[in-house]
């Protein structure tokens, strides 16, 4: 068995394109995990919801823009469900996400009508597709159809919009909600409303990413979101570890997250190239994320053994 | 300005942990009155303040702020009328946000949060001046993350945030208790000057009897969820710690106050 570097090199454009699409998802995860300080497991379901809505609408003859918009809105609805579970019903964040995620399994099956819904790039006008990538590389399609460019454009526009939004009065109040609930309420901020809004925004982006991925791979599948939260977290953490020292600016940090997703996919591609059994990928992902989450914790307990526990952040 | 009408609060009712925290407590604060609140642990001081702030609903009674009945308003809506500083320096500010961002959030207390930009250039000048008045050198560190500030700096900042938009009522919950004596004195001094400058109606809880006597123009003492001592005017000015302890044992009918209060 020999490893051919050219083979890996040939896989790179695909890994970058996929990474960028997942990057949008990771930015969604960043909103809940870092800004709202909530681990939101809804994403495993809402990612597929986005793919399902997008593919089914395309199959019904709607154009790709409207389909993606509806995927985004459907994702926002899933975030709304989780948000209401948390605020109105008082269910803990993790459990609320798990409940929505479980419920979405049925919803997604209902949207698609079956566990896997394919869409043929020959018969429909898609925005991104693995086929386009191959054609661009072969030179039979103009370069601006490259999914890397299209997905990259999505990332840049989304980061721009988020940079603006989190700088507004409303956006600032959402950041305050995630940092310190007591302070936020004392400053007259409706923390419940903000949590719901943040969850909706986050899951909207996750679903949009799902819609793009379904087009890229040519199908929506009931399992496409399984473990998405871990991939999202991996991208967030890699992005922070690699770029946090360089980027202070919020927009650049978000771009760093997307870059983190690219790095993740390049690594995965490299691991596959080394002939690792793909069945073990999820185990590997989980372990990588666990290690990256543990390192800051270990660092802290090593450098400040007698430091007072807690402090800083309020749950 | 503040009218507390016979409020009661019991925590964990009908369980072994049942705790009657407030027993039909009533209190009226005149406009601009600065009241210090003392009492032993579990006397209901913080519960009273939190009930006014709306952290939890009261079981009974009414709370009016400036004539508006706020008894049923959630915490974040009451915040439009109330400025607060907590005991824990971590609690009053958003650590991961900058000094100016924290102040901007506070300046918009009681307003709808719109999609306008979070901080305007005009405000920055105002922030600089306010921070300069603290004398902590914070005016040149507008974008510094609040998490990097010391406890005293944070409490001073929280105090600015609580008063940057003149509140109808200022609630201070042992806001110097977690600070070292020197810093505590400085923060208290700042408190006094802001309260006097803006003639703020203020409720200040303190563990320190001397502080309670020295500051404010009225002093109340809580015991088992009720007000047992209430002195103001000339009588307050002539108050000493010994006198206060005597008042307390007479009102509560016990001597346990002595060691409990002196020790705290």
Image: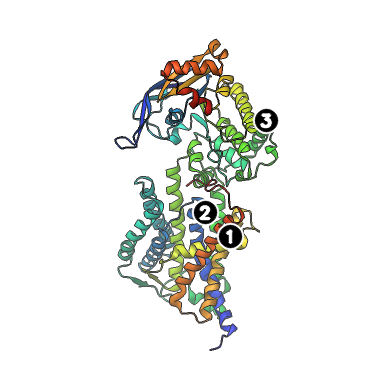
Residue under label 3, please give it.
Answer: B133
Category of crowding for the residue at label 2, using alpha-carbon neighbours closer than 10 angstroms: few (below 14), some (14–19), many (at least 20): some
Q: Determine whether, in the image, residue B197 is placed left or right of residue A28.
A: right
Residue contact between numbered discs 2 and 1, judged by CB atoms under 8 Å = no
Q: Does dot 1 land on a helix, a strand or a loop?
A: helix
Earlier in the chain: of badge 2 and badge 1, it is 2
Query: Is circle 2 on the same chain as circle 1?
Result: yes
Q: Chain of mark 1?
A: A
Residue located at (49% from left, 55% from top): A33
**Which colour style is shown?**
rainbow
- Position in image of residue A45 (x %, y %): 38, 62
Q: Chain of mark 2?
A: A
Query: Can the viewer see residue A154?
Result: no
Query: Is circle 1 on the same chain as circle 3?
Result: no
How far apart are labels 1 and 3 at the CA level?
A: 37 Å
Query: Is circle 2 on the same chain as circle 3?
Result: no
Q: Does dot 3 land on a helix, a strand or a loop?
A: helix
Q: Chain of mark 3?
A: B
- Against A26, is B105 above or below? above
How many marks the image carries: the answer is 3
How far apart are labels 2 and 1 at the CA level?
A: 11 Å
- Residue A34 is tagged as 2
- Position in image of residue B17 (x %, y %): 34, 37
Category of crowding for the residue at label 3, using alpha-carbon neighbours closer than 10 angstroms: few (below 14), some (14–19), many (at least 20): some
Name the residue nearer the viewer: A188 or B195.
Answer: B195
Residue under label 1, please give it.
Answer: A240
């Amino acid at each position: 068995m020999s490893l051919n570097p050219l083979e890996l090199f040939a896989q790179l454009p695909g890994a970058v394109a996929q990474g960028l699409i997942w990057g949008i998802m990771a930015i969604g995860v960043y909103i809940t995990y870092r800004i709202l300080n909530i681990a939101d497991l809804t994403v495993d379901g809402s990612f597929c919801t986005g793919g399902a809505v997008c593919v089914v609408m395309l199959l019904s003859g709607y154009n790709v823009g409207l389909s993606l918009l509806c995927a985004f809105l459907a994702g926002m609805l899933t975030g709304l469900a989780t948000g209401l579970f948390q605020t109105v019903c008082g269910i803990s964040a993790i459990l609320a996400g798990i409940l929505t995620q479980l419920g979405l399994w049925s919803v997604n099956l209902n949207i698609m009508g079956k566990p896997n819904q394919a869409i043929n790039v020959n018969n429909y006008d898609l925005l991104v597709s693995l086929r386009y990538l191959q054609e661009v590389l072969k030179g039979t399609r103009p370069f601006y159809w490259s999914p890397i460019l299209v997905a990259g454009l999505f990332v840049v526009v989304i980061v721009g919009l988020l940079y603006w939004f989190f700088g507004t009065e409303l956006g600032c109040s959402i950041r305050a909600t995630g940092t310190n609930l007591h302070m936020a309420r004392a400053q007259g901020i409706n923390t419940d409303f903000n949590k719901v809004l943040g969850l909706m925004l986050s899951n909207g982006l996750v679903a949009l990413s799902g819609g793009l991925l379904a087009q890229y791979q040519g199908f929506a599948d009931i399992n496409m979101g399984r473990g998405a939260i871990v991939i999202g977290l991996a991208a967030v953490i890699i992005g922070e570890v690699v770029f946090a020292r360089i980027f202070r600016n919020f927009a650049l940090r978000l771009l760093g997250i997307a870059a983190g997703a690219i790095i993740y996919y390049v690594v995965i591609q490299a691991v596959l190239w080394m002939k690792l059994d793909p069945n073990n990928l999820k185990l590997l992902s989980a372990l990588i994320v666990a290690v990256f989450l543990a390192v800051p914790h270990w660092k802290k307990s090593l450098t400040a053994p007698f430091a007072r526990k807690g402090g800083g952040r309020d749950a | 300005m503040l009218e507390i009408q016979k409020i009661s609060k019991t925590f964990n009712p009908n369980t072994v942990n049942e705790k009657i925290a407030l027993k039909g407590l009533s209190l009226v604060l005149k406009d601009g009155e600065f009241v210090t609140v003392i009492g032993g642990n579990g006397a209901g001081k913080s519960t009273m303040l939190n009930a006014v702030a709306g952290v939890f609903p009261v079981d009974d009674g009414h709370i009016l702020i400036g004539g508006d009945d706020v008894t049923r308003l959630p915490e974040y809506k009451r915040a439009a009328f109330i400025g607060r500083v907590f005991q824990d320096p971590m609690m009053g500010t958003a650590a991961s946000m900058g000094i100016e961002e924290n102040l901007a959030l506070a300046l918009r207390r009681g307003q709808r949060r719109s999609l306008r930009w979070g901080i305007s250039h005009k405000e920055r000048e105002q922030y600089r001046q306010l921070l300069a008045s603290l004398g902590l050198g914070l005016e040149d560190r507008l974008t510094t993350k609040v998490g990097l500030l010391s406890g005293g700096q944070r409490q001073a900042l929280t105090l600015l945030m609580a008063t940057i938009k003149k509140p109808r009522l200022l609630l201070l919950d042992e806001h110097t208790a977690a600070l070292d004596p020197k810093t505590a004195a400085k923060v208290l001094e700042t408190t006094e000057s802001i309260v006097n400058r803006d003639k703020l109606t203020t409720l200040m809880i303190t563990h320190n009897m001397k502080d309670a006597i020295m500051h404010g123009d009225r002093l109340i003492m809580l015991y088992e969820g009720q007000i047992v001592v209430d002195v103001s005017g000339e009588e307050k000015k002539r108050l000493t710690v010994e006198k206060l302890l005597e008042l307390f044992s007479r009102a509560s009918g016990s001597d346990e106050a002595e060691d409990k209060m002196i020790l705290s």
